[in-house]
Amino acid sequence: MRRYTLRQLETFLEVSRQLSVSRAADKLHVTQPAVSMQLRQLETAMGMPLLEQAGRKMRLTDAGLDFQQYVIGAVAQLKQLEDAMAERRGLKKGRVELAIVSTAKYFVPMLLVRFRKNSRTLKWYYKSTTARAS
């Protein structure tokens, strides 16, 4: 696998949207030489040019057009991954396992009703156990 960074992919996408290194640099809040360096490193990693100069403007090469579609999909997948992990961190999604003794099985479910209404994306597993005397 060739080595490239998410930052390089994001830089490539912005340049492909703006079709200008300078405008992409402004949008990304970095310098124009930094954008040029990211693009150069990415093209080296891919082993082919992805953009070409057309007068004062830039345009995507055929390889760049294909690459752009894959990068859009990859960045979208990474965004979904970030969202899923953020849900877990915020307890918006996950799994709750609860085991209670038989004497609590009458009042604990009522206590959990309100919590469960506010946590609909959590999966709930409920198990009633019988306490054993030793």
Image: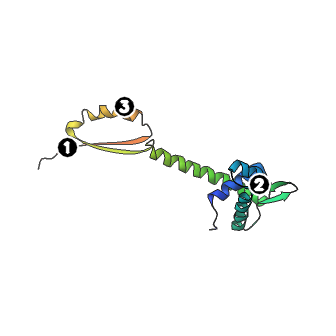
* Extreme residue toward the left, this view: 134
* Secondary-structure class at tag 2: helix
Of the numbered discs 2 and 3, the one sitting upstream in the chain is: 2
Amino acid type of the residue that numbered disc 1 sits on in the rendered structure: Thr
Judge from the rendering whether residue 58 lies leftward or rightward of residue 14; answer left or right: right
The residues tagged by marks 2 and 1 sit, at their Cα atoms, a distance apart of: 69 Å
Q: Position of residue 107 (x, y in %)?
A: 25, 32
Crowding at mark 3 (Cα within 10 Å: few <14, some 14-19, many 20+): few
Which residue shows up at 17% across the image and 44% down it? 131
- From the image, tell me which residue sits under label 3: 114
Amino acid type of the residue that numbered disc 2 sits on in the rendered structure: Val
- From the image, tell me which residue sits under label 1: 130
Amino acid type of the residue that numbered disc 3 sits on in the rendered structure: Arg
Crowding at mark 1 (Cα within 10 Å: few <14, some 14-19, many 20+): few
- From the image, tell me which residue sits under label 2: 21
Of the numbered discs 2 and 1, the one sitting upstream in the chain is: 2
Q: In the rendered view, tell whether residue 127 sits above or below residue 16.
A: above
Q: Position of residue 28 (x, y in %)?
A: 68, 50
Which residue shows up at 30% across the image and 31% down it? 110
* Secondary-structure class at tag 1: loop
The quarter holding residue 121 reads top left
Is mark 3 in CB contact (under 8 Å) with mark 1?
no
Crowding at mark 2 (Cα within 10 Å: few <14, some 14-19, many 20+): many
* Secondary-structure class at tag 3: helix
* Nearer the observer, 82 or 127: 82
Which residue shows up at 77% across the image and 52% down it? 22
Q: In the rendered view, tell whether residue 57 sits above or below residue 3.
A: above
